[in-house]
Image (spheres, rainbow, N blue to C red):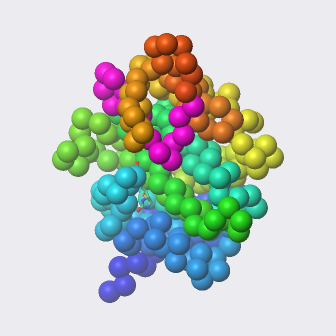
């Protein structure tokens, strides 16, 4: 039996110009990020989306596993071939986080926040993770895959995640149509990508991104390999760096590639 045949439970009403116009659906796969990289090698166009109902080797950030049970979550990856270089392309992960917050608001009426740089949280627990992988150097046009996992209709979280993660259903008691949420997210992403491309930075999205930032005004510990420090998180700057004010009043610009940020009093 071909376990990657289409699932009639999914019917994504794509309303975009390019984001998700080409959509590959798998009932089961290892990782949609790996599929997108393979499709890129086969010449798939900018905006190609891979969606799976279940992943057997879902990947999270920092080499972690992303548990991907079937039927109740969204696992998708968008393949991007931007006209700009890798250093600018890294900011697209923040663009995706903002688009996901907006789509959850549009589709479910829920106010999720962003834990910098790109986790979505609801009531202090994670509902969505984003894994961006860049291929290609600054000189050549990069190929970017942005993988998104959203805990949509899960009734409980897998063991080990109950303290830090939740789902849209667990927080609201309402079931969400996964296809509608994905279609809405792709619409938001296409528009936000246009704004990002216009400025080649987060400048045009800064105010809205910062208004969603749950770390803002909170005491955080910055896990920098060059030396950990604590401070109060402000917003991000146009480069997507988190501004953290240390006790002596210095404002440090924290770049997401090298470090992670922990709340002092819990996950956020
Ligand atoms: C994180 O650790 O927060 C990032 C999680 C990213 C998970 C998504 S699910 C779809 C895509 N495919 C993967 O293997 N990972 C990403």
Residue 1 image offset from top left, x and y in percent: 32, 86
- The magenta region covers 253-268
Residue 134 image offset from top left, x and y in percent: 56, 62
Residue 117 image offset from top left, x and y in percent: 51, 39
Q: Which residue lies furthest to the bottom in this view?
A: 1
Residue for point 54% across, 40% down: 255
Residue 196 image offset from top left, x and y in percent: 73, 45
Instruction: Locate residue 154 relative to residue 196 in the image: left or right.
Output: left
Quadrant in which residue 228 is drawn: top left
Q: Which residue lies furthest to the right in this view?
A: 198
Quadrant in which residue 259 is drawn: top left
Q: Is residue 243 above or below residue 91?
A: above
Q: Does the magenta stretch include residue 254?
A: yes
Quadrant of ligand 1: it is bottom left
Quadrant in which residue 222 is drawn: top left
Residue 48 appears in the rendering: yes
Residue for point 59% across, 75% down: 40
Q: Which secondary structure is most common in the magenta stretch?
A: loop
Q: Which of 93 and 90 is in front in this view?
A: 90
């Amino acid at each position: 039996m071909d376990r990657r045949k289409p699932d009639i439970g999914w019917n994504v009403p794509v309303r975009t110009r390019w984001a998700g116009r080409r959509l590959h659906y798998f009932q089961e796969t290892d990782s949609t990020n790996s599929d997108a990289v393979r499709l890129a090698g086969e010449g798939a166009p900018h905006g190609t989306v891979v969606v799976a109902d279940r992943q057997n080797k879902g990947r999270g950030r920092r080499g972690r596993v992303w548990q991907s049970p079937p039927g109740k979550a969204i696992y998708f990856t968008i393949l991007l071939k931007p006209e700009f270089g890798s250093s600018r392309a890294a900011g697209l992960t923040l663009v995706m986080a903002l688009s996901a917050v907006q789509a959850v608001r549009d589709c479910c009426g829920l106010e999720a926040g962003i834990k910098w740089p790109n986790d979505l949280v609801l009531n202090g627990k994670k509902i969505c993770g984003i894994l961006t992988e860049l291929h290609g150097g600054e000189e050549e046009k990069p190929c970017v895959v942005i993988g998104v996992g959203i805990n949509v209709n899960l009734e409980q979280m897998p063991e080990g995640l109950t303290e830090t993660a939740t789902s849209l259903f667990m927080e609201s008691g309402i079931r969400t149509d996964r296809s509608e949420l994905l279609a809405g997210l792709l619409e938001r992403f296409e528009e936000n990508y246009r704004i990002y491309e216009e400025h080649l930075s987060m400048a045009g999205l800064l105010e809205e991104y910062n208004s969603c930032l749950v770390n803002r005004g909170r005491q955080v510990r910055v896990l920098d390999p060059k030396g950990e420090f604590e401070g109060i998180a402000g917003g991000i700057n146009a480069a997507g760096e988190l501004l953290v004010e240390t006790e002596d009043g210095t404002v440090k610009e924290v770049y997401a590639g090298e470090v992670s940020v922990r709340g002092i009093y819990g996950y956020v």
